[in-house]
Each structure stands twice: as C-alpha cells, then as structure tokens.
Amino acid sequence: MKNYWAKFGLLMFVVAYIIGCGPNAEEKKVQEFITKHVDKIAPKMKEANLAYWSAANGKPEDFKKYAELDLEIRKIQSNPQEFALLKEFKSNEQIKDPVLKRQVDLLYNQYLENQIDSVLMKKIVDLGTKVETDFTGFRGEIKGKKITSNEIEEILKEETDSRKRRDTWYASKQVGEKVSDDIIKLVKLRNEAAKLLGFDNYHTMYLSMNEQNVSELDQIFDELYELTNEPFKQIKAELDSILADMYGVGIEGLMPWHYHDPFFQETPLVYELDLDIYYKDKDVKELAVQFYDGINMPVESIINNSDLYEREGKNPHAFCADIDREGDVRILCNLKNNERWMETMLHELGHAVYDKYQDSKAPFLLRQPAHIFTTEAIAMFFGRLSRNANWMQDMLGLTDEEKNEIENMSNKYAQLKQLIFARWAMVMYSFEKELYANPDQDLNQLWWDLVEKYQFVNKPANRDKPDWAAKIHFTIAPCYYHNYLLGELLASQLHHYITTNVLKLENDKDVSYVGEKAMGDYLKKNVFNVGAVYQWNTMIVNATGEPLTSKYFVEQFVK
C-alpha cells in the first residue's frame, strides 16, 4: 500500500507540474520573482564556476575572480526586501503549485544564509578564499624537499621503514599549521553571521538550511556508533596485528603513520591481495567510460570537458563541477592507473551523471540533486565497484581463478572499508559540531580525543599541532562531512532496492552492474531526472518505497 500511494503521489505531482490547473495571481507573482532571480543568478553562477575551475587547474589568481563573483551572488541573495517577499510566499496559502512551493523553499534557505551585513559577508568570502588558496598551492616538505599528495599516499601505502612513514605523515600535516589560525577566524566569522540570524552557531544554521537538524543526525550517528563499535574493534585488532608484524613494532607501538593514508579514512591493503596490480596496465579512464556507456549513461561529453591528470600547481583533490545546469558537467582528477583512482573516477563520474541526466525541462532552481548527500550516495554507489570481484572480472577480463582469489577477500575489504569510513565520519561530525560550539577550546586535544574514541588510533607522544586543520573540508565544505556517511547509507538502500526490485535477484552475490541498462534507467528516472523537485526523504520514499534507513548498510557491511 505504501508503494502504491508513493507512486500515486509522484504521478499527481508530475501531472500538476506538466499541465497545472492554471496559476492564480499569487502564483504568477511567485513565478515572476523566480524568473527575474534566475535571470540574474544563472550567468553569474556559470562565470563563478568557470573561475573556480580555472583556479583549481593551476591558476590561483582566478580564486580572486571566483571570490568576487561569489560575493556578487551572495549580495543578490542578501536583499532584505526580496527575503521578506520570500517569507510571504512561504506562508501564502494561495500558492498551491508544489513545484513553485519547492522553489520558494530552496530560495528562502539560500537567502537566509545571506541576510547578514555585507562587510561581514565579504570577510567570510575573502578569508575562505585565502585559506583555500593556501591549501591549493601548499606542498609538504621532508628534509627540505617538497612532496605531492600522490607521493604521500604512495609512501604510506608501500614504505616499510617506520621513520620514513613518520616523516611523510608529518609532512602531510604541515599545511594545518599554515591555515589553522585562519580557519578558526573563519569559524568565528561564520558563527557571528549565524547568531545575527537567530541560530546558536553556524553548524546549527547550516543543517537547518539544508533541511537537516542536529538531533536527527545525532540519533543516526549514535546508533551507528553502537552498532559498529564491537565489529570495528574486532576487525581493527586483526588489522593492527598484521600492521605490527609488517612494520616490526608491537601493537601498542602502532602510530597514525602506520596506516595507509594520513587520516585512517581508507582501507589498508594488507590481506595478501594488492588490487593495484589488476589496474596498473589498464587505463582507468577508459574503463570508467566503457562501464558508464554500458549502463546507458554515456559520459563522453563529461570526459571531453574534464581535466584528468596531475601537474604542478593543480588542485590535488578530485571534484565534479556542474558549470551551468545546461549540460556542461566536468570532473577534475589526478589519475594514476591504480585501484584508488579507479574508485575516484567511478565516484566523480557518479556525481557527474547525476548532474548530466537532470531533466533539462525542469525549472533551473530544481535542476540539481535532491540534497548534497544524495549525490554523494550515487558517487559512492559506483565507487564501491572498483573492489567488487564481479565487476573487476567483467571489466578487466579476469579468469575465474583470479576472480575467486579477489572474492575471498573482497567481502572482508568491503566491511573493513565501510567500518573504517563510518568511524572516521564520526570523528569529522563530532569535531565539527564542537568546533562551531566553542572554537576557543583546545582543538588539538579535542581532535585526538575523538580520533582515539572512534578510530582507536594512538596519539603521538607530546603531539600538540593542529592536525585537524590539514583536512580541507573544514574550509571548502563546512558542516558537510556527515553527508558522506548519509550517502553510504543511501547507497546501500539503493543497492538493496535495485538488486531486489529492478534486477529481481534473490541476493547480490553475483551482482556486478556491468551492462545493466535497467539499473541505469531506474536511476535516471527515479533519482537523477526528478532533481530537487522533492525534499530529499520524499525522493527516497518515491525511489525505494521507504525513508532513509541505516538497516541496509548494517546488513551489507556490519552483520
């Protein structure tokens, strides 16, 4: 019955959207407001996105242009008369068209953030741009020699000398010392703006503007903490035993640099299987293109606009950019032919196809994902495939023997990966909540308290550096990181629904998704094409028959 009414409601919504009942005078007023707003905002958004793209591709001077355009957009959305009008629209019962109401809700939230003094707004934008510029151009040093992010990752994956690993880990944190003071200033400026708008702090405000709240997130994170605590403790004890033998130290002597990335957010490849060997002679770009083509989601136009390979001065962090909501979608990567970049390529193209396959006839404001975490869910859904033995066999032409060898460990790796990431996301969510609640506390100690609580990683003796500040997300994506974990939950929910209801399988044992056009068509129709027409949980109910739940994540990776 629930599925029937969800589908019926979706049908009625679409019918109202397509043919309507004829707008009344108030609805015409709303539509006129929206049209004028989009006419002003769309060209500036495109120009700003192009400036950011240019800056990230090695032209840091364009960060200034991006900041100026971002400020112009914020000034448009800071207009108090227009904000007052949006308030009226929200409460006006004569506005019944659900598509108009949805656009009003989204605009209201965008305007709300910008109802602050223009001088304060400029300080926030300028300081955020400065910190990001510092991040983009920074390279850590070991004994006076600069080292890239890819080199750091390679050393932490492959080096067995603990001293070299330690020096590399320290180098990965040096950027934190450069930017930490500015990040704290930025947090205080954001808090000042939030308090002027009636919120306790920026963290609370940001969640509210994104249709979330602290209590619901606390409930999700607390539940997952309890459900994952013992499984994580057990699997990490096994991992630590292997790492201790590998590096010739006692388990109690394991330090952060003994894990395989600077934050212990990724899975160390220690179980007698190096997946990189299956990708080293392949072209990860071509593999990704071939896969997406096979599920009826061609990505050639995305690839043609993208920048995929490492060079001096280029942003080391991968991302996807929807330049204009008119089809110009791009990704930035620093590709190597290894498993990590195979996952990244699949992941970023997941974001990209979500943007590319929006309904081009939908209103501009709704031509975006239902929520920031729903696009993360799609990226994660596809990114998981790089370690899936079935996918690897179908895409790489592996023998049954090779496939079986991978499969024997792939479930363990999948569980380890998800548990490690879930616990890492708990660190980020808890730290950021406390950061905005009290930016003057001992943040260095707070960071390590949380790392030890959630990740069971030892703090280096006498360490008192702003290691937390080496995570760029505090600057470029404030109060965002919890959405990665929500994305993992939704990715598992979609996986369950597609396996059971789209592919009609009893279980997911042999699922690779390679060539599954029905899966691609389902996602395009039920997730991508509807854009932001619905509030995120309504979209999830319509697509899967139930609201967001953690049960499928737990079934897939914890039990």
Image: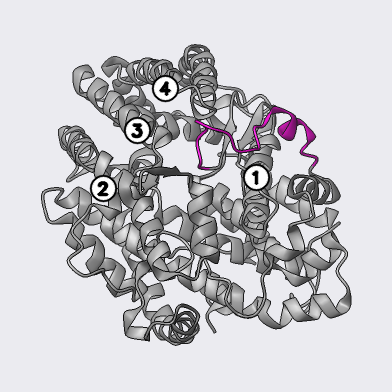
Mark 1–mark 3 Cα distance, whole angstroms, equals 23 Å
Assign the magenta stretch its main secondary structure.
loop
Crowding at mark 2 (Cα within 10 Å: few <14, some 14-19, many 20+): some
**First of labels 4, 2 by sequence position:** 4
Which residue is located at x 69 percent, y 33 percent?
Answer: 359
The residue pinned by badge 3 equals 134
The secondary structure type at the circle numbered 1 is: loop
**First of labels 2, 3 by sequence position:** 3
Q: Residue 204: which numbered mark, if any? A: 2
The residue pinned by badge 4 equals 63
Crowding at mark 1 (Cα within 10 Å: few <14, some 14-19, many 20+): many
Q: Amino acid at mark 4?
A: Phe
Q: Is residue 35 magenta?
A: no
* Any part of residue 281 in sight: yes
Residue 353 position (above or below residue 63): below
Q: Residue 335: which numbered mark, if any? A: 1
Q: Amino acid at mark 2?
A: Thr
Q: Outermost residue toward the left?
A: 440
Which residue is located at x 27 percent, y 58 percent?
Answer: 431
